[in-house]
Image: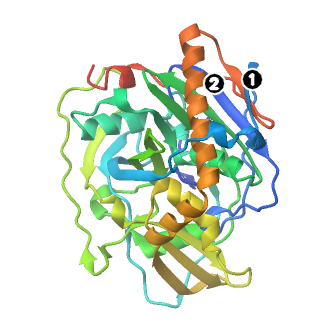
Amino acid sequence: MLRGDLSHLRRGGSSSSSRAGSFRGSWRGNSRGNGRHGKDRIPIKVNDEMPLGNLVAEFKVGDITSSAMPTAEARITDCKYTASYSLNDDKPFKVIVPGRPASWKPPSLPCQLPGDHGDYLRDQNGARFPDHPIQPTIQALFALNENFDPSNIDLLGCASTLGDLLRFVRSIESTFRFDIEVVGNTLFLIRNNKSDVIPNVRGYGHSFLDAFTSPDPDDGVIKSHQRVVSYNFSGLKCLVRFECDAYLLSCAGRDTLVTEPQFNLRPPLLDSIDLQRAGMVVPQGSVAEIKTKSQAVGVIQKGDHLPRLWVRQIPYFITAYHSQGTFQDVQVTNVRQELVEWETEHQDELKRLASILRSLITEAKRRTKRGDGAGAANFLAGSLGRQAGTDSRYWTFGQWG
């Protein structure tokens, strides 16, 4: 696990809690995946140091019949910004709440950039806080929402874990593993890449972020900005965490309104992660995802990225093409309507996703009540086998005890 100096590592892909385990699943379809920010896709390494446990459930896409799926439409509604925080490499590690994403400030085109090089972290939270990777999220939630009530939350997850399940129900080639735990009424789905490093990165995606986005100078050197949105999906109250690339300073001809946060002033638990109060609240309606690609390789297929944007409810998609590092075609697109249309067109798959989430919640709660240890759940071939490792006090009783 990475517990030492992280200054030589950069952020990789974007972006937990009393008894359960970890899921690893795989599906062989006929679609290809795409790396983020123009990087080559690197398979996720699965850590099998701990036993996977007994098989307790198996999921096959073909077995999820219409009778098992919800009858109502599986749509995301009532999406709201709930919390955010930024991470840097200052020692000891701390969480900057609410932080602020980098702002979109493109230079004049054409723009020649140096190539990416070096190693990049895949999981910014797990690398810094390997024992409790979801704890920064929970502390940020309580720090920014004095009256936050966790008892009505059905699911809290990394966007990457929901993306894994969404690819599974869509029969897209994918291999995945994530940790699950139940605390109170909430199922946690947490990515399992705590010590993964993407080595020897090549391309221009990270250089593009450095050149075309600008962090607030008061925030210092920020390695990652994490956001949490709440929404209802098919009757489930969800909190979803993801890494944010940037936000637009103006949208639809209007300046983006950032606001001062309202902090919970009660003292934290004794062994809490240190919080630094800094930054501004940036509305979810202004955030953007960025994708770069070489003109020689082909066109960025927006449809391939809509599922990712849908899970995160990101309304803007920025595409940038380069020729040997020279960028001269950069487009900012509002994809709100396309996300609604994609959701409508993929109702059968989204209903299967809702059915699996409900089954996971039911099974995890059943095993927790029985006092069972970790087990395994197959997604055609898969696993479940260890506790995700978050101190349940932060959720069951709230950060403020």
**Quarter holding residue 255:** bottom left
Q: Is residue 326 above or below residue 96?
A: below
Q: Residue at x 23, y 62 (%)?
A: 258
Mark 2 crowd level (few <14, some 14–19, many ≥20, 10 Å Cα) = many
State the image coordinates of residue 395 (x, y, percent, origin top left).
38, 25
**Quarter holding residue 296:** bottom right
- Tell me which label, 1 or 2, sits earlier in the chain: 2
- Helix, strand or loop at disc 2? strand
Q: Is residue 262 above or below residue 391?
A: below
Return the residue nearer the eye: 324 or 236: 236
Q: Residue at x 67, y 65 (%)?
A: 39
Q: Mark 1 and mark 2: span between their CA atoms?
A: 8 Å
Res 116 seen here: no
State the image coordinates of residue 275 (x, y, percent, origin top left).
31, 38
The amino acid type of the residue labelled 1 equals Leu
Return the residue nearer the eye: 51 or 184: 184
The circle drawn on residue 21 is: 2
The reply, left or right, for residue 81 in relation to residue 106 is left
Mark 1 crowd level (few <14, some 14–19, many ≥20, 10 Å Cα) = many
The quarter in which the C terminus is drawn is: top left
Assess whether mark 2 and mark 1 are in contact (beta carbons under 8 angstroms). yes
The quarter in which the N terminus is drawn is: top right
The circle drawn on residue 52 is: 1
The reply, left or right, for residue 379 in relation to residue 269 is right
